[in-house]
Every structure is written in C-alpha cells, then in structure tokens.
Image (tube, rainbow, N blue to C red):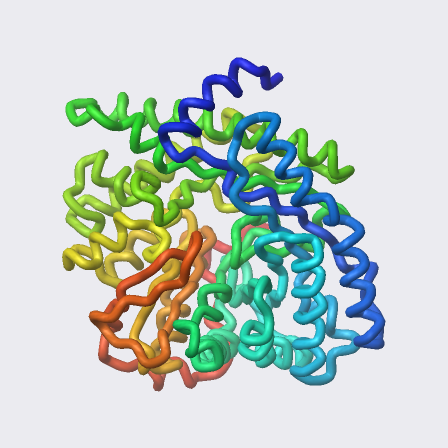
Amino acid sequence: MINIFEVAETNKMIEQKNLDVRTITMGISLLDCISDDVDILCDNIYKKIVNKAGRLVETGEQLEREFGIPIVNKRVSVTPIATVGSACANNTQDYVRIALALDKAAEHIGVNFIGGFSAIVSKGSTEAEDIFMRSIPEALSATEYICSSVNVGSTKTGINMDAVRLMGEMIKETAEKTGDNDSIGCAKLVVLCNAPDDNPFMAGAFHGISEPDVVIHVGVSGPGVVKYALENKQTADFRELCDIIKKTAFKITRVGQLVSQEAAKRLDAKPGILDLSLAPTPAVGDSVADILKAIGVEHPGAPGTTAALALLNDQVKKGGVMASSYVGGLSGAFIPVSEDQGMIDAVNAGALSVEKLEAMTCVCSVGLDMIAVPGDTSAASISGIIADEAAIGMVNQKTTAVRIIPVAGKDVGDTVEFGGLLGYAPVMPVNRFGCSDFIKREGRIPAPIHSFKN
C-alpha cells in the first residue's frame, strides 16, 4: 500500500527537484462510435469523449491539491482514427471533419492534447488508410489540440516503405501548412516503429484495440530528481551509480502509482499502465542531458554518451518495475532536443549531431524527437531518416520514433520557438547526400530473422 509517508517524502522532490506527474491520459475506445455516416460518427465521437472525460481535468486538479503533486498535463487518447473512420471517410475532408470533432471535444473538456489521429500500417495500408495519411497535414493545420501518429513498422512485420515514403511527404506538407507558426504542426506528428498501444505520451499516444473501454494511464517524469541524486557522486563506482538511479526511479514510480489508483477510481475507469519516462522540460535543472553530464560526459555527444544513456535507461526501467506491476508504455529516458536545455546547449556547443542522436536512440526509450532541421530538407531525406530509425526499432525489438520539424523558411543557425513544454530548438544540419533512389523503391523491408518465434 502507498501511504502518506511516501507522499511526504516526495514533497522535497517536488519542491526542489522538478518532480511532477507529466500526464494523466484517459484512453477511450471509439469502436462503438463507428458509423457509415461521417456526420453520425463525428457526433458519436464528440458525445463519448465529453461524457467519459468531462471530469478528467477537474479530477486531476483535485489530486494536485490533495497530494501536492503537480500534474502538468491532462490528456485523452482514442482508438486510431484511420480504423474508426474507415467505414465512412471517402476523402481527406472526411478525416479532417473527424479531426475537428476531436478538437472541439478536447476544447470543451479542457485537456492539453488529444492523441489518436493515428494509423497502424506496419505491414501495408488500405485505401482508407492512405486517404487518412494524406489528410494529416490539413488536419493538423486546422486544429489546436490534435496529435497524430503513424506506425510504419514492427519487428514482426518489417517496415512498410510505401508508408515511410508517404510520411516523408506528409511531414513536408505539414511543415508548409503551418509555416507561419514555425511549422509547429510537425511537433504534433510522429512516425513510429513498434508503437505500444498503451502510451500516455504525445504525440504517439493512441488507445489500442486491446484496451478496455476507458482506461487511465499515468506518465511520471523526474530527470531533475535523478540529477540531484547523482550530484556529488563523481567517485562512485558503477554499482553504486546504478543503485542510486534504481532507488530514485522506484520512488518516482510510487508517486505515479498513487495518482493512477486515485484517478482511475474517481473517474470510473480501469487503471492502466505507469510510464516512467524521464521526459525533460525546458526548465533549468529538468534535463536528461544534465544527468548524462552528472554521470561523467562533458556534453551529450561526447565519447561515452551512448553507454551512459544505456546505463541510465536500464536502471530507470529496473527501478520502475519494482514499484509497480503495470509499468508500460515507453518507460526510460527521452532525448528530445527542443524540450531539454542541456541538449540544446550540446547542439550549440557542436557536441551533438543528428547522427549521434540516432546512435543514442539505439539505447533510449524512443527516437529522434523534436529535432528542427532546415526547411529545404527534402521529403526523401526525411523518409530516409524515418527508415533508419524504424530499422533500429525493428532489429532491436524496441519502440523508435521520428518527430522531425523541417521549419519553413529556416536554416542552420536559426532558432525556432514552439512554446510551453515543446520549448525551442536550434536548426540542425542534415546530411547533404541523398537517398531518393532508395526511398522510391516500392514494397516492404522484410522482418528480421529473429522475428520468427512462434
């Protein structure tokens, strides 16, 4: 049982070390909303979200007051819209109408984001799913709260290169359609491999078809807490270092366990998973990069960075699984550039490149995240970056993702401002050599040999 003494112990973490619950995310199944009439579908979606999540924000605020734990975001995720809308959406405008219905519901209930404008096309796509993917740029430019994701590969199926090619084009189009706001639409669009269906973190959250009707997932963060625990431990050996990280991760996860239990009970929902991800913010001291520096690298990107990140990620997972039986989602360390002041500093110092970030994604929780690149980066190059990340995920049986922003009108040396948790980012250079002959090939990269386990 979680008791008030554990809550008291965390108060110091909250007050001094930037500990927070990053998100309470209510997952809602929309399978019972499906209709062959798009107007009826939109009406069903709006009513169900408002009915099920109408008290989500209020409940989160109550828990903040009662436990003294900051809950930064209240979010909703829904069944992938490419699936929900396939019976009635005959063109991109139909999917945009569904996006507007989701956006209207999100505004009504007061959440920060709503995820699930998504498609799962890891082995191939239907005509309806192709239409859906082509609707993403307009949907993101016409809405405020929508987050979109497309899963293009998995260890079991390989990589759908047709979807990879199309998503490179859609990212470019999204950047152009939201170019008057630093291409922010791309900050709400992620392409994944091995996407989990219980992820509370945007932009990749959606409600999996294997989930209950309504579920509460909690995402806990706390890079500042881990950094604080490692301060003045420069002479610790690796055993002591790992023990410190594990114990700290355990305590952080217990905070999330308390919030998850109470939120699910009060919202008449099934408790879902705890995602213990060290998700940084632009706030000073709330940085995964600073943890790596505390472990001993001068800047992220220096030799030893990937090993240090692997150590951190593994110990976070080990500590988390001891604290809760239902740790899931991604759970580890995020390395988004724009959301982590230490990562931004490393880029500005010349220590960190896109290529080194890609190497780091082999051992962290997600992938190339919130990276601003020149606006003239080609769709083929973006698709190549997606394919590289998907290959890392496919071969290593892990989730990888790409959230890349080709900022319209910006070039290397410029800075883009997204605001809030999305932060700001320096525009990073992309390898100038092309891959269009590779990307234009049709079909699917087969699953790796170790995928055959039945």
In the image, residue 338 above or below residue 384: above
Corner quadrant of residue 304: top left
Corner quadrant of residue 23: top right
Outermost residue to the front = 65
In the image, residue 145 above or below residue 283: below
Report x, y in % for residue 22. Answer: 50, 42
Which residue appears at 34% of the width and 77% of the height? 381
Which residue appears at 65% of the width and 53% of the height? 110
In the image, residue 4 above or below residue 265: above
Left or right of 314, for residue 70 = right
Which residue appears at 70% of the width and 53% of the height? 109
Which residue appears at 37% of the width and 81% of the height? 380
- Count numbered badges in the picture: 0
**341, 270: nearer the viewer:** 341
**89, 5: nearer the viewer:** 5
Quadrant of the frame with the N terminus:
top right
Left or right of 258, for residue 322 = left
Corner quadrant of residue 184: bottom left
**388, 167: nearer the viewer:** 167
Report x, y in % for residue 74. Answer: 60, 47
Report x, y in % for residue 81. Answer: 68, 67
Outermost residue to the top = 5
In the image, residue 173 above or below residue 227: below
Report x, y in % for residue 272. Answer: 65, 39
